[in-house]
Image (cartoon, rainbow, N blue to C red):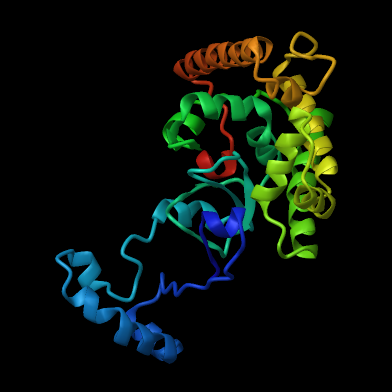
Amino acid sequence: KPYVNGRDLLQTSRAAMIIDAFGLTIAELADQHPSVYQHLLVHVKPERDSSSDRQFKELWWLFGRWRPQFRSFAAGISRYLATVETAKHRLFIFLDSSVIPDHRLITFGFSDAFHLGILSSQIHVVWALASGGRLEDRPVYNKSRCFEPFPFPALEEGALKQRIRDLGERLDAHRKRQQALHPDLTLTGMYNVLEKLRAGEALTAKERVTHDQGLVSVLKQIHDDLDAAVLEAYGWVPDLEGPFPLADRLAENNAHAEAIQQEILTRLVALNHERAAEEKRGLIRYLRPDYQAPD
């Protein structure tokens, strides 16, 4: 199966593949995939034989930790969301459900682009930067702090939810299309340029190439439209609207930008408390009810 880590997603893909024999007994593996069986027998079993971990030793042809929760949520959908745990830019990307993620990727059991839209918005990015950790100068996305307490907007199916969904699809498709057209184009490069556009800084010759190949001004417009729609979903229009896109105002790195960040965080914390009170009363706003509460 395809295997990806953070560098594959944000820089250049190695097109790596990995052997995943999950679901097969040793007899089934030997019978159905003899060449794979021999590879594991020669290259994996000797090391596993010396392991003090009983599971590693007895089930030597399988991953040491096969992540049943990930396999459970990925089994019912054609794609899932992932973000790189430690990265300069907080990006959420759809991966095909056949892809095996590296342990440094944070994965989410969503195939609906609505969720990609909410998580990709500046509302969530501000929250994640404030609640997550840091490794040197890079933000770290901690699932238990950045995702689990984050309150999604309570939005019924309708035109606004569909608009966020459509923008999420456009965002994912735009990045993948431009990278397919330009194999050397990286997500990190595209978002470095986007960051400079927001700051009003001049681009170098190399960055202008990235801008043109990645259609980064189009990428910026998608993000700006997405932020506006998500603000509306939370009911924070017009009081958090401004003369410029939300991300541009947050990029100003001044007292006004800090005040906007604090206001967003204050409102999210208050909404988190509202959600907690609702859950005590028995109202749970499932993000994926068919999986979380099928009955």
Name the residue: 79% across, 58% down.
177
Q: Nearer the viewer, residue 199 or 145?
A: 199
Q: Position of residue 123 (x, y in %)?
A: 65, 25
**In the rendered image of this protein, does residue 5 appear above or below residue 218?**
below
Using the rendered view, name the quadrant where residue 221 is placed. top right
**89 with respect to 238 (left or right):** left
Residue 77 visible, this orientation: no
Name the residue: 82% across, 34% down.
163
Q: Position of residue 272 (x, y in %)?
A: 52, 17
**117 with respect to 146 (left or right):** right
**98 with respect to 223 (left or right):** left
**In the rendered image of this protein, does residue 207 appear above or below residue 259?**
below
Using the rendered view, name the quadrant where residue 250 is placed. top right
**In the rendered image of this protein, does residue 29 appear above or below residue 206?**
below
Q: Position of residue 48 (x, y in %)?
A: 23, 74
Residue 72 visible, this orientation: yes
Q: Nearer the viewer, residue 128 or 255?
A: 255
Using the rendered view, name the quadrant where residue 25 is placed. bottom left
Q: Position of residue 226 (x, y in %)?
A: 77, 32
Name the residue: 67% across, 33% down.
118
Q: Nearer the viewer, residue 145 or 108?
A: 145
Number of marks in picture: 0
